[in-house]
Amino acid sequence: MAAAAVAPPLLAQPPAPSRRLSLELPPLPYAYDALEPYIDAETMRLHHDKHHAAYIAGLAKAVEQVPKLAEQTLEELLTSLAKVPEAVRTAVRNHGGGHYNHSLFWQCLAPNAPAAPEGELARAMARDFGSFESFKETFSKQAMGVFGSGWVWLVVEGGKLQVATTANQDTPLSLGKKPLLGLDLWEHAYYLKYQWRRAEYVAAFWHVVNWPFVARRFTQIAHAR
């Protein structure tokens, strides 16, 4: 009687890369019209559902080309852009930056927001800017000085608060800075309501800043050093 054939051993398969990179559109933490009259509902709908979603789609295409990108968080990729393969580095910078910046931006806004920060963040502002009003003046002035598209930020670097700007969808992470608060200065963020009047948009922004969120973020970053 012939011996039964022995099946060849299965070749070990390499483990699937663990996905740490989120490619999902985060939901808005409020209704589209919640920030009226300062930011209109149609702008929020288009900005979140179309513009932010397009950045995620662009980043997903880069991940299709280099699947190992998914093993890192978005913050890790943007902090170390020089280590991203050159073939997709620009896509990660632009689309990954757009995804990161907008994900933070939605959380920086809130209806019925307090007019100013309190606690540790308020004390840090007094230390590094002289006062909260001085910070607002510096932030607003730099927002108006951004030529074309970009962002203005409240950031932490070396334990100190600073105001910084970035062009296009560049992030402070790539500059070694930790962003606390950002304002989108691309025209898609305000043109339906304010057209060319960026100064009015910047002034309206102060009515919807989610200071409790920004303060919590500052405390987490400050104590993680």
Image (tube, rainbow, N blue to C red):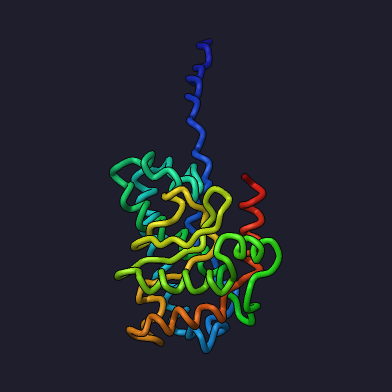
Vertical order, 181 against 140 (above or below): above
Q: Position of residue 33 (x, y in %)?
A: 54, 85
Q: Position of residue 178 (x, y in %)?
A: 52, 53
- Residue closer to the observer: 55 or 57: 55
What quarter of the picture does the C terminus occupy?
Answer: top right
Check the image and name the residue furthest to the front.
130
Residue in the image at 39% along x and 45% along y: 81
Check the image and name the residue furthest to the right.
119
Residue in the image at 57% along x and 60% along y: 128
Vertical order, 69 against 41 (above or below): above
Count numbered badges in the picture.
0
Q: Position of residue 25 (x, y in %)?
A: 49, 64
Residue in the image at 63% along x and 66% along y: 213
Q: Position of residue 126 (x, y in %)?
A: 61, 65
- Residue closer to the observer: 205 or 73: 205
Vertical order, 194 against 90 (above or below): below
Lateral position of residue 208 relative to residue 64, left or right: right
- Residue closer to the observer: 1 or 208: 208
Residue in the image at 48% along x and 85% along y: 40
Vertical order, 211 against 100 (above or below): below
